[in-house]
């Protein structure tokens, strides 16, 4: 099945419009604006799409890493975070403790995103999830560099596509999707909306 069809069914897409295509997920068993709904559905999507090798940028205390690994028993996840600033060491210890139950399916890299990306070959990942620094420059660089590491048919996704307070994310994602002629990309209806699309072009 076309990955976009799987996405549209999972996110309850009711209208195919000009991008971004808005997920509904606001009726039935889904509670509109539940902060966790979009991210939980995204984790389930990775399983339905058969993804087994992914990277999360911005781990913090490891809450979402735990969700990804719990919903995807065949997933190997690499979590990247510099863990700097106030309470950084405490959050790093929390993440290690929370994720220890997943054994060798999780690897934590304590370094900057643009340093960590050099470790991964181009077109080697099933997905990348970006939830770190949200300035225009940071998100743009992450999309460019980590996007090259995702294989065709894999997914590029992230958090914070909100016009009210995350304008750096909005502008960077808009610019990236426009420049790569990505027509089928989606946002969820969370408090901090997630953005996502299937990669369909050769990295250059």
Image (cartoon, rainbow, N blue to C red):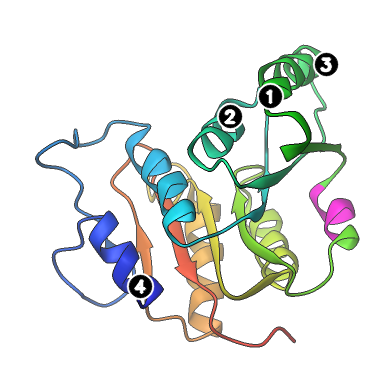
- Residue at x 68% of width, y 21% of height: 101
Residue at mark 2 to residue at mark 1: CA–CA distance: 6 Å
Q: Secondary structure at mark 1?
A: helix
Work out which quarter of the rendered image holds the N terminus and state it.
bottom left
Residue at mark 2 to residue at mark 4: CA–CA distance: 25 Å
- In this rendering, would 79 be left or right of 134? right
Neighbour class for label 3 at 10 Å: few (<14), some, many (≥20)?
some
Relative to 109, is 143 above or below? below
Disc 2 to disc 1: CB gap under 8 Å = yes
- Residue at x 73% of width, y 74% of height: 123
Give the label on residue 66, or none.
2
Neighbour class for label 1 at 10 Å: few (<14), some, many (≥20)?
many
- In this rendering, would 138 be left or right of 188? right
**Tally of numbered tags:** 4
Q: Secondary structure at mark 4?
A: helix
| Residue depth check, mark 4 versus mark 3: number of the one nearer the observer | 4
Q: Which residue is mark 1?
A: 99
Give the label on residue 89, or none.
3
Q: Which residues are magenta?
A: 113-117
Identify which residue, 190 or 63, lies in the foreground: 63
- In this rendering, would 81 be left or right of 110? left
Q: Which residue is mark 4?
A: 4
């Amino acid at each position: 099945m076309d990955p976009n069809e799987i996405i549209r069914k999972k996110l309850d897409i009711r209208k195919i419009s000009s991008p971004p295509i808005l997920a509904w997920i606001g009726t039935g068993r889904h509670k509109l604006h539940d902060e966790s709904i979009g991210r939980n559905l995204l984790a389930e999507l990775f399983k339905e799409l058969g993804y087994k090798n992914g990277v999360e940028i911005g781990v913090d205390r490891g809450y979402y890493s735990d969700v990804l690994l719990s919903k995807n028993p065949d997933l190997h996840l690499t979590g990247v975070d510099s863990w700097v600033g106030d309470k950084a060491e405490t959050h790093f210890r929390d993440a290690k403790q929370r994720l220890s139950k997943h054994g060798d399916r999780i690897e934590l890299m304590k370094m900057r995103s643009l340093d960590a990306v050099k470790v991964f070959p181009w077109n080697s990942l099933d997905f990348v999830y970006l939830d770190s620094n949200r300035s225009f420059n940071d998100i743009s660089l992450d999309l460019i560099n980590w996007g090259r590491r995702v294989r065709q048919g894999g997914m590029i996704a992230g958090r914070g596509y909100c016009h009210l307070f995350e304008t750096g994310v909005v502008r960077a994602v808009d610019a990236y999707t426009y420049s790569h002629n990505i027509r089928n990309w989606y946002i969820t209806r969370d408090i901090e909306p997630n953005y996502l699309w299937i990669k369909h072009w050769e990295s250059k």
